Amino acid sequence: MDQDNRPFSVAIVRNIWTYFYLAPPQATVLQQVRSSIHNHVGLLRLFEDYETDLLTIDDRLWLQRIALEPYYMGSATDKTVLSRLEATKQWAISSATIDWDQYDFVFCLDSVVPTNLMRRYRKPVWAIFLSSPCPSLYALQRWLPLYGFSLAFLDQLPEEPDKNGANAAYPVGQRGFPLSFFRSNDLLRITADAAGKQPPRAPKAGVHIEKHCWDLISPAELAELKLFGPVSSRVDREQYFSTMTERKYFVITHNDIRYLKGHAIIEANGFGCLVLVKRGVKLAMEGLLDGTVNFDTFEDLIRKLKMFETDRKAFTTALTKQQQHIDRYSYELPKSLLEQLVHDHQNQPSPKPGLAAGLRNTVATTLYPLLWIFGLPLYRAAFQTVDRIFGKDLSAVISSFLHGGRRV
């Protein structure tokens, strides 16, 4: 950042097909995060820690149509969802009307802006963030990074430096940043702020079960869990914030479920819940597990819940350890990365124009769209063929290999 330590300025850019932040620009932070169609809170601390503008653009670029829109439109079959997306057109603006040099960092959330604007406005770091990347778009982005962007955040996961401060897991131009960017108790706080009261002083109670585990809970197990208060799972978006504010525990009861990213654990931490996880759960953010309470069997889970209910010190100790550990992944490391990227960008020498640079720009802007237009459908077709012939298990293995060992 600049030497005068002025506030960091950020633009979050979405297009009319982006599932995040569908409320009007003047809405509160809570209204924005609750308006998202995805069941994730997202980049909350960008709004709170920096001078952040939320911009909806409707430029109808070729990449929006060819790459991004088909993915989102293909998954948005609900007419209500489509009408909500269409409603954001009323506050959409053209990217050409914006002075992009007023920002230090431009966060393109499932969106892009014209390449010529990114080349013209050199001050900000231009980053694309794919919040729910389809495998073909994700992998093609790894092969052929979007031209004009400073970097890409692809896998929704925070990165953790090695002992030397480097991160060899990411190719040049790609970094890690979590989809859930906030601290412990942040969600509890903003929910209370919206209600015009302090965070609840009354004891939280009950258990919220991870949604993929809900169908695996037997009636007898459910009855045992109800001894600790209300039990919930799979609540809709309108009830999610109020329900999680009231719950004391978040539990992943089974380890034979789908591969999880870990955002639900970060969100539970944001609501001040103690997280208990069955050993053996497959988690993309594997490091989060070191901060949670682990158990081996359902009987072991019940024993630990009883202990936490009767031993307030044990509960407080476990919650404090969890919050310190998860905050490092979901807030401290990504915040440090973001500010370091801006610092490095602002202190690097400006590129010198020349024949080589001009030729490179001409070739890139001419051929790059063609590679994306033809490359993405071919990639999709190849994966669909593998799925039909060999099943999705082989497709997932190939996808993981192409993504550098990270599953999506």
Image (cartoon, rainbow, N blue to C red):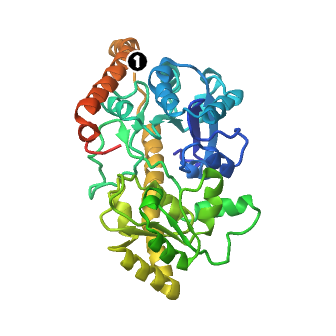
Residue 189 screen position, x and y as percent: 64, 63
Q: On the picture, is 246 further left or further right than 301? A: right
Residue 39 vertical position relative to residue 358 in the rendered view, above or below:
below
At numbered mark 1, what does the secondary structure look like: helix, strand or loop?
Answer: loop
Does residue 332 appear in this view?
A: no
Q: Residue at x 43, y 49 (%)?
A: 337
Residue behind mark 1:
353
Q: Is residue 232 above or below residue 396?
A: below
Residue nearest the observer in this picture, 58 or 380: 380
Given residues 367 and 50, the one toward you in this image is 367
Where residue 41 appears, as percent x and y from the top left, is 56, 51
Who is closer to the viewer here, 241 or 196? 241
Where's residue 259, x and y in %? 35, 52
Looking at the rendering, which quadrant does residue 81 occupy? top right
As drawn, 133 above or below 31: above
Of 366 and 131, nearer the camera is: 131
Give the amino acid at mark 1: Pro
